[in-house]
Each structure stands twice: as C-alpha cells, then as structure tokens.
Amino acid sequence: MVSIEPAAPEAATEAPPLQAEASTEPTATWTRKDLLDTDVLSGEEIGLVLETADAMAEVRERPVGRVATLRGTTVVTLFYENSTRTRASFEIAAKALGADVINLAAAGSSVGKGESLIDTVRTIEAVGADILVMRHPSSGAAALAARHTDASVVNGGDGAHAHPTQALLDLYTMRRHVGDLAGRKVVIVGDVLHSRVARSNLWALMAAGAQVTLCGPATLLPRTLRTLPGHEGPGGCEVTSDLEAALLGADVVMALRIQRERQEQGLLPSLREYIRQYQITEERLARANPGALVMHPGPMNEGVEIAPEAAHGLRSVVEEQVTNGVAVRMAILYLMATARPR
Ligand code: CP
C-alpha cells in the first residue's frame, strides 16, 4: 500500500471508488528511469501507478492538498507543441508534491535560436533538472532525449507515437467507474492513425485485459496494429469501420479529436461525411451498454467527433479525466523520483 507522508489524520479518509476496486494487486516496484510509452509496462507496473494515484487523489482531497515528499526535486516541463491539460496538470502535480517546477516553451527558449533538442536537454540537466516532462511534434523525440540525459524523461506526447500519461489517466478513470477491465469492451473512435492517445491506450488496455475496438474511416485506421509483435496482452484488439456494430455492448466509448488538417491531406472526404458516419451522439450511444462511459482526451471539437449532448451528458467523464490527470501525474512523478539514484 502506498503511503504519502506527512498525513493529515483528520483528513485522511480514502476517496471511495465509484464502483469496484481493480482486482490486480500491484506487486511491482518502479525501477524505470523514463516513461516513454505504455507498451513496455507490465500489468503489475500499471497497477502500481493506479494504486499510487489513489493515494495521490486522497492527498488532493485533504484541506491543504499538498505534501513535501518531493522537496528538493526539480521538474522541468519542455513543450514544443501547444498543451493545456498535460502541461497544467504536470505543473500542479509537481507543486502538490513539493517539487520545484520550471516551465519552458520552445517559443521562449533558445530553441528559437536554433539550439538542438539534444543540446537543450543537456542544458536542462546541467541546470539541475531531475525530471524532464516533454512534448514534441516528432515521434521518438522523448526517446532521443532520454538517451542523452541522466534526468528522468516523461513523454508528454511525441508526434503520432505515444502519450503514456494520458493513457494511464484514462485507465484510472475507467477503473474507478467500471472496476476490473478484464473482458470489458472499450471502443476508440476517430483518427486512430494519427493518435498517440489511441496507441498508448491500446497497449495499456490490452495489458489490463480489455477488449479494444478501434473504429473510424478506413483511411484513418492503422490495420497493422493487430499484428505488431510483442503487444499481445491478455486483452484483444479489433479494427473496424462499422461504428454501429462497434458500439454494441461497449462499456467505454472514447472519441478522438479529428485533426482538421487531415481533410487537407485527403484522408477525409468531408467533415460533414465524417460527422454523419462517426460522430458520437446520444442516439448512437443507445447501442452501448447502459451506463457506458463517454470519454475524450481533449481538446474536443464539439459538433465534429462528438455531439455536445454526448460530451456533457450523464455518461460523460471528460472533466473527470482532466481532474484525475493530476493524481495520476503525481503518482508518476513520485514513482520516478523515488526510483532515481541518490
Ligand atoms: N489530452 C491532451 O494531451 O491535452 P493537451 O494537448 O491540452 O495537453
């Protein structure tokens, strides 16, 4: 059991799960220097993150909402792409653990003078960073950075490759409502081909034993995902363009943002056609299981991939995803900081 000190005894009541607790008892300890994707995480490691996030959520519910566990640790966020949720929640998470935080955006840094990613990362390490949270438009950028620094690197999204902390907060949100995900049907709808969120969710969900259905227009579906070696968790993956069939019996429906630039690339016939065939609406959600969760990683294009009534309806946990992102990112920072050599 994870214990975060100092505790406030009068406020230490644990937030009850909304339904059943996850059945997987974590037996892992965190030993990883970096978190680059979910594809390398075992079910036990994912369980450890989620249990630690429960403890962090309890910290957030205390009157003060912060502890000094990471005092003396420096977290740097380095974002080469726009972000609201990821960047803000990492900053709040680091401060809630007592860490020092420095936020760097490519636009205001020496990147604008032509400094390379490797030199930037080495500079950040030289000024004393322990953990570097980075977002970059190129797939593999976080892995490249991790190879050139002793700081721990957390991938906050790299190109179309991975967004592991988003997947872990999504899993955390699902498990608080659905309980054990083994055998549960999770349908991810939209531009799967370009979605780092879909990829990282797929690996995490399969490790948790879920049955994942990836759904969208054929031009936005990576059919190779089913056959990639080394990714056969206890769960399964199906790829389809038939949304009506995909939604039958779904326990979770996650809409992905449609990136309008894909239309210019000719991957979508028209937004109107996409909306007609793939928009998540209350009417379509009637095919899912009663009480199925509606999720979206954000930012949402309401009226495109998701209708406003579905985005803000009773089944929607979109805002809760954002809230849970703080606890999950606190868990990740805590585990990574405590695994670092002293
Ligand atoms: N989901 C997500 O990564 O949102 P931001 O781009 O706002 O960080």
Image (cartoon, rainbow, N blue to C red):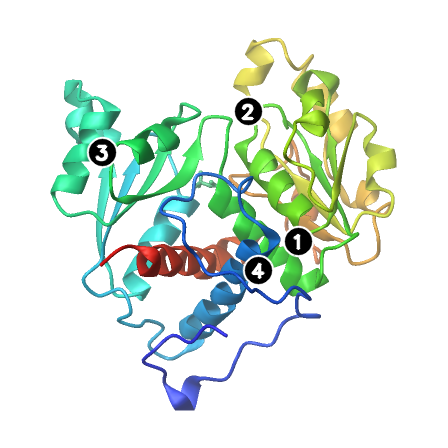
Point out residue 180 in the picture as x, y percentages from the top left corner: 71, 61
Distance of label 4 from label 2 (alpha carbons): 32 Å
Q: Mark 1 points at which residue?
A: 316
> In percent of the image, x 49 and y 59: which residue is there?
323
Distance of label 4 from label 1 (alpha carbons): 24 Å
Q: Check the picture and name the quadrant holding the C terminus.
A: bottom left
Q: Which quarter of the picture shows residue 62?
A: bottom left
Q: Which mark is residue 121?
A: 3
Q: Which of marks 3 and 1 is nearer the N terminus?
A: 3
Point out residue 148 in the picture as x, y percentages from the top left corner: 26, 32
Amino acid type, label 4: Gly
> In percent of the image, x 37 and y 27: which residue is there?
141
In the image, 124 versus 143, the foreground residue is: 143
Q: What element carries label 3?
A: helix
In the image, 72 versus 109, the foreground residue is: 72
Q: What element carries label 2?
A: loop
For this orientation, the residue located farthest to the left is 127
Amino acid type, label 1: Ser
Q: Mark 2 points at which residue?
A: 259
Distance of label 4 from label 3 (alpha carbons): 30 Å
Q: Is mark 1 on a helix, strand or loop?
A: loop
Q: Name the residue under label 4.
A: 47
Please tell me whether mark 4 or mark 2 is closer to you in this view. Answer: 4
